[in-house]
Image (cartoon, rainbow, N blue to C red):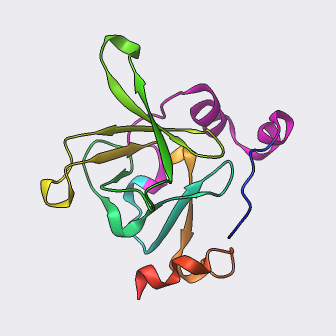
Amino acid sequence: MKNYRRPTEAELRKKLDEISYRVTQRNATERPFSSPHNNNFKDGIYVDIVTGEPLFSSRDKFNAGCGWPSFTNTISDDAVREFSDKTYGFERTEVRSQIGNSHLGHVFDDGPKEFGGRRYCINGAALKFISKDNLEKEGYEEYVSYFD
C-alpha cells in the first residue's frame, strides 16, 4: 500500500500548473470540454494529481455529454469524501480526495440508472491518468486485475 501525503504549499506550486492548482486548491471549475481526460476511454485508473491517491477506474467512466470526465462510481468505497456545497444558490454535493483534500468536482443523482444512478462529474485538471500498461511501473499493481 502506498503512503500518500499532501504536499506543502511550496511543493504544490511547483508541481501543479495554474488550472490544476486553482481547481484542486481553490475550488475552481475548468472550462467544459477542455480536459483531454474527457475523451480518454483507455483502460487505466485516475488518481489525485496532488497525492496520487486512486480515485476512479476507466471501467466506471462514461460519456455524460456534460464536458467533464464522468464516472458512475469511485474506485473504492473510501476513495473520496462528500460535502454539502450551497454556492451559487443551489445545493450540490462536492467531492474531495481523502488525503490531499483536493477539490475534484461534484456528484449528482442523474447518472445511468443501471449503474446506480450516480454521476461523478470531475474536473480533469484534478486527475492524473495511469494507463493499464503503466500500473505496475507507477506503483499501482493492485489495480492490474481490474482489467483482466
- In the picture provided, is 83 more to the left or to the right than 129? left
> Looking at this rendering, what residue extends furthest in the bottom direction?
148
In the picture as drawn, the residue positioned furthest to the front comes out as 78
Query: Does residue 44 show up magenta in the picture?
Result: no
| Image coordinates for residue 4, horizontal then vertical, percent | 72, 56
Viewer-nearest residue: 41 or 74: 74
Range of magenta residues: 8-37
User: Where 7 falls versus 133 (above or below)?
Assistant: above
From the viewer's side, name the closer residue of 16 and 79. 79
Left or right placement of residue 82 versus residue 107 in this view: right
> Is 27 within the magenta?
yes
Residue pictured at 68% horizontal, 47% vertical: 50
Residue 74, given in percent of the width and then of the height, sits at 41, 56
Q: Is residue 76 left or right of residue 48?
A: left
Q: How many marks?
A: 0
Residue 31 rendering spot, x and y as whole percentages: 44, 34
Q: Which picture quadrant has residue 53?
A: bottom right
The residue sitting at 33% across, 63% down in the picture is 60
Work out which quarter of the rendered image holds the C terminus and state it: bottom left
Q: Residue at x 71, y 43 (%)?
A: 16
Residue placed farthest to the left in the image?
Answer: 113
Q: Position of residue 29 (x, y in %)?
A: 48, 31
Look at the image and tell me in which quarter the N terminus lies: bottom right
- Look at the picture and state if 96 lies above or below 142: above
Q: Residue at x 50, y 54 (%)?
A: 79
Dominant secondary-structure state across the stretch colored magenta: helix
Left or right of residue 58: residue 112: left
Work out which residue is located at the far right of the displayed protein and give it: 10
- Above or below 81: residue 57: below
